Amino acid sequence: MEIVVDDLSGPRIIELLDEHVQEMRSITPRESAHALDLEDLRKPGVTVWSVRDGDAVVGVGAIKELDPFHAELKSMRTTSKLKRSGIASLLLEHIITEATARGFTRLSLETGSADFFLPARRLYERFGFTYCAPFADYQPDPNSVHMTKTL
């Protein structure tokens, strides 16, 4: 497996990200769904990595710069067939390393509060993320939890 910065031009990454956004919108009320679409992921200040297994894109994750010291983890997704296979851990470790190398001292995220998101929350906890108040432009929302990690 290889992790690469993705320019979001290939059909496989576009398909995986579309699957991600569609699933998040099907589970979470529209006003509480904060998944970035393809256009938002292409904006300055956002870096997207894909996990590739040969020609297949099997995972994706991104960071969005909030300020020079604080970034937000976005778009963490593993293909449905490979969920809970270690790809998310591999990618999260890579993103934390990259965020640290870029000089960020804090990495935060928003995820869902529903049981569906429990495996994701447990993953983040294992990597040292702790629960926190809403950050950036987020507001308190019963459908969201916020987590942060000091790098």
Image (cartoon, rainbow, N blue to C red):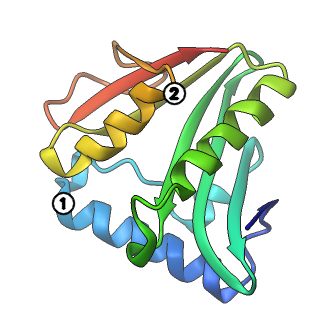
Q: Nearer the viewer, residue 59 or 86?
A: 86
Residue designated by label 1: 27
**Quarter in which the N terminus is drawn:** bottom right
- In the image, residue 74 sits, relative to residue 142, either above or below, namely below
- In the image, residue 59 sits, relative to residue 35, either above or below, namely below
Residue designated by label 2: 127
Sequence-first disc among 1 and 2 = 1
- Write down the quadrant of residue 132 in the picture: top left
Q: Nearer the viewer, residue 127 or 131?
A: 127
**Which residue is found at the position 65% from the left and 41% from the top?**
63
**Which residue is found at the position 44% from the left and 28% from the top?**
126
- In the image, residue 25 sits, relative to residue 86, either above or below, namely below
- Write down the quadrant of residue 8 in the picture: bottom right
Q: CA distance from mark 1 to mark 2?
A: 25 Å
**Quarter in which the C terminus is drawn:** top right
Q: Is residue 122 left or right of residue 61?
A: left
